[in-house]
Image (cartoon, helix red, strand yellow):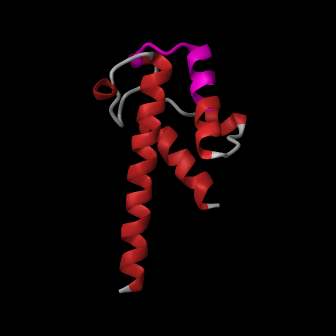
Amino acid sequence: MRAQRMIVHAAADKAQVLSDVRGIIAEQLGTDLDKVAADSKFVDLGADSLDTVEIMMALEEKFDIQLDEEGAEKISTVQEAADLIAAQIDK
């Protein structure tokens, strides 16, 4: 039973991370939250390289983490950003 609770808790945390990431991206890009889906690519949302850097900085501040440059450069979708952050939080 305890393992099941931990899995549910982890899933809820990942859902919350995704929700927070979506909100930050929408705010940074000045777009509606409903346009920012998990599978949205930053470029499709109108983000250029400067926007992407600003998004990463906002995510680092929100989650109090440090994203390495190599990992951040590989992110192209909202879900990838959320997954990277969730992995950093779990460390």
Q: What is the quadrant of the C terminus in the image?
A: bottom right
Q: Residue furthest bottom?
A: 1
x then y, percent, for residue 86: 53, 52
x then y, percent, for residue 35: 30, 24
Magenta highlight on residue 89: no
The residue at the point 46 percent across, 17 percent down is: 29
The residue at the point 71 percent across, 34 percent down is: 69
Quick check: 51 above or below 25? above
User: Quick check: 34 left or right of 76?
Assistant: left
Magenta: predominant secondary structure element? helix
Report the number of discs.
Answer: 0
x then y, percent, for residue 64: 66, 46
In the foreground, 59 or 80: 59
x then y, percent, for residue 84: 55, 46
The residue at the point 49 percent across, 47 percent down is: 83
Quarter of the rendering containing residue 77: top left
User: Quick check: 89 left or right of 16?
Assistant: right
Could one spot residue 77 in this view of the protein? no
Q: Which residues are magenta?
A: 44-56
Could one spot residue 48 in this view of the protein? yes
